Structure formats: structure tokens, C-alpha cells
Amino acid sequence: MSRKLRLQGVDAPEICQRGGVAARDTLRALVEQRTLKVQVKYLDDYGRGLARIEVDGQDVAAVMVQRGQAWSNRWRRSLGPYAVEEAAARQAKAGLFAEPDPELPRAFRQRNGSCYTTDEKGAFRLK
């Protein structure tokens, strides 16, 4: 069964943003053809499930942040649930953090909007 999900607790670069393809490819390598444990507790504004996903006992979101492929999702003054993993990735200059000042996806979306548009059937496609 196929569903649109978002990893809970992280913000990864948009596919059309610098680092977006690498983040997608990292996620794909972590989960493709693997048995996943998926827990969905909430839906986002677009009806996608906000999911905690595990593979072989590993939290996929934590691994994405550790590898520098996503940010811990900030909320108000909180650095988010993966702040420790993000700090380690920054210190190691892993992935996105190899750049001196990587742009938060939230800032990218505010400036550029989404990389996607919907067609007449409501399916998403790249702009």
C-alpha cells in the first residue's frame, strides 16, 4: 500500500532546493525494499500523515538528521526533537552542513513557494 507521509520532527530540503535530491536519495536508500514500522499520530494541513518510521530499530528521521540530510524541526524557541543529532551533524560538517550557511527549507518555501503544483486530477508534479 502506498501513502504520502512526512517524517515527524524533521524538515528536509525541498526537492528543487540545494540538497533536496541528496536528501531524497538518502531517505530512499534507508527505506526502499525494507520492512518499515510506521506510526502515524497526526495529519498535516494537506492530509499527509506525520509519521515516525523505524527500520531495523532505527528512527529514520534521526538518521536523516545525523547524516546532515534534514534539520530538526524547530518550534518557537525549541530546537526540536533531533537537536542533539543536528548539532553532531553540524560539527561533523555532514551533508547539508558542509556548506557554511545552508538555507532552512522553511525560509526557502517562504521565498519560492513549493516545488510542486497539482494537475487537473489533483496529483502533485514538479513545477
Image (cartoon, rainbow, N blue to C red):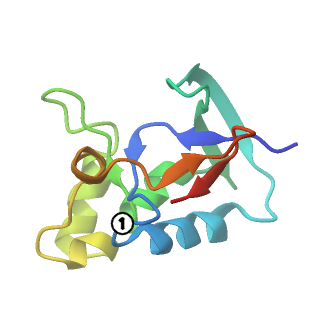
Say what secondary structure mark 1 lies in: loop
Q: Quadrant of residue 100?
A: bottom left
120 and 43: which is toward the camera: 120
Give how far across and how far down residue 73 sits, in percent: 32, 40
Q: Left of 36 or right of it: where is 30?
A: left
Q: Residue at x 62, y 55 (%)?
A: 125
Q: Residue at x 49, y 50 (%)?
A: 61
Does residue 18 sit above or below 34 in this rendering? below
Q: As drawn, which residue projects farthest toward the front?
A: 120
Q: Left of 114 or right of it: where is 119?
A: right
Q: Residue at x 20, y 39 (%)?
A: 79
82 and 21: which is toward the camera: 21
Q: Left of 16 or right of it: where is 81?
A: left
Give how far across and how far down residue 10 sits, in percent: 40, 45
Give how far across and how far down residue 78 sits, in percent: 19, 31
Disc 1: CA contacts within 10 A as few (<14), some (14-19) or many (>=20) = some
Q: Give the residue pinned by disc 1.
A: 17
Q: Quadrant of residue 99?
A: bottom left
78 and 24: which is toward the camera: 24
Does residue 25 sit above or below 115 in this rendering? below
Looking at the picture, which amino acid does disc 1 mark?
Gln
The total number of labels drawn is 1
Q: Quadrant of residue 25?
A: bottom right
122 and 37: which is toward the camera: 122
Q: Quadrant of the N terminus?
A: top right
Q: Residue at x 41, y 49 (%)?
A: 114
Does residue 92 sit above or below 12 in this rendering? below
